Amino acid sequence: TQTVSQSDAHVTVFEGDSVELRCNYSYGGSIYLSWYIQHHGRGLQFLLKYYSGNPVVQGVNGFKAEFSKSDSSFHLRKASVHWSDSAVYFCAVSLTGYQNFYFGKGTSLTVIP
Amino acid sequence: EAAVTQSPRSKVAVTGGKVTLSCHQTNNHDYMYWYRQDTGHGLRLIHYSYVADSTEKGDIPDGYKASRPSQENFSLILELASLSQTAVYFCASSDQGAAETLYFGSGTRLTVL
């Protein structure tokens, strides 16, 4: 079974802390890995994407993610979070030659001011 | 800026009734998607389309129909709404499918009673 797994349903940190949101996948072949953010009551918005090359991808608003083929992971990190980063974060996998995007269940990040 | 608009924002429907959710994009994108989001689940693909007058089944198409009368418009139709179809529905567009970024609408919250 091909899956996208986000092991933490909820993460709570204080403003200024660093945070890592975990994503593991089990797809083979050529894939695109993405992170999306969903603020309460809104649609998802793109953060960053990886396909090949430098395994560390810089995204918007200080977010970055690192691809690891050996661990089948694409974890999202931010060095110093702000209260406005509170949202649900989704990891997604899309396969070359196919048109679907497969999403994890999401991680709800709460940043305490 | 790319824009995907959905209507209505929310809807209450009766079991067995017909429901139509509409989506309009001004991105000039070829690909459009309908996803549903349930609490505790990621987004799951219902239908998608890569050209006007053609639609494709996604992972959970049962109970849903889709219509793409033009590049800009993509509708999701529930001919006989059921309780299990209560969810938030998101429309999205992308330029070239899996290789590209998804642009999401703000969602439609559907409640079937």
Image (tube, grey):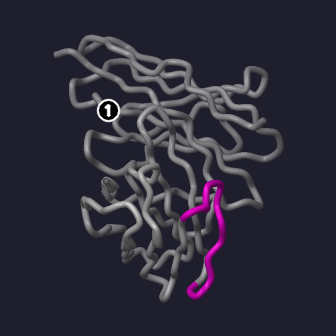
Q: Is residue A62 left or right of residue A84?
A: right
Of residues A3 and B61, the one nearer the viewer is B61
The kind of residue on which mark 1 rests is: Ala
Outermost left residue: A113
A42 above or below B56?
above
Rendering coords of residue A77 (x, y %): 46, 23
Rendering coords of residue B69 (x, y %): 49, 88
Q: Which quadrant of the figure has residue A85?
A: top left
Residue at 24 percent across and 24 percent down: it is A82
Outermost right residue: A29
Secondary element at tag 1: strand
A80 above or below B6?
above
Q: Main secondary structure of the magenta part?
A: loop
B9 above or below B43?
below
Residue at 54 percent across and 72 percent down: it is B65
Residue at 38 percent across and 16 percent down: it is A11
Task: Specify the segment rendered in magenta.
Answer: B52-63
Crowding near the residue tagged with mark 1, few <14, some 14–19, many ≥20 C-alpha atoms within 10 Å: some
Of the 4 image quadrants, the one containing the C terminus of chain A is top left
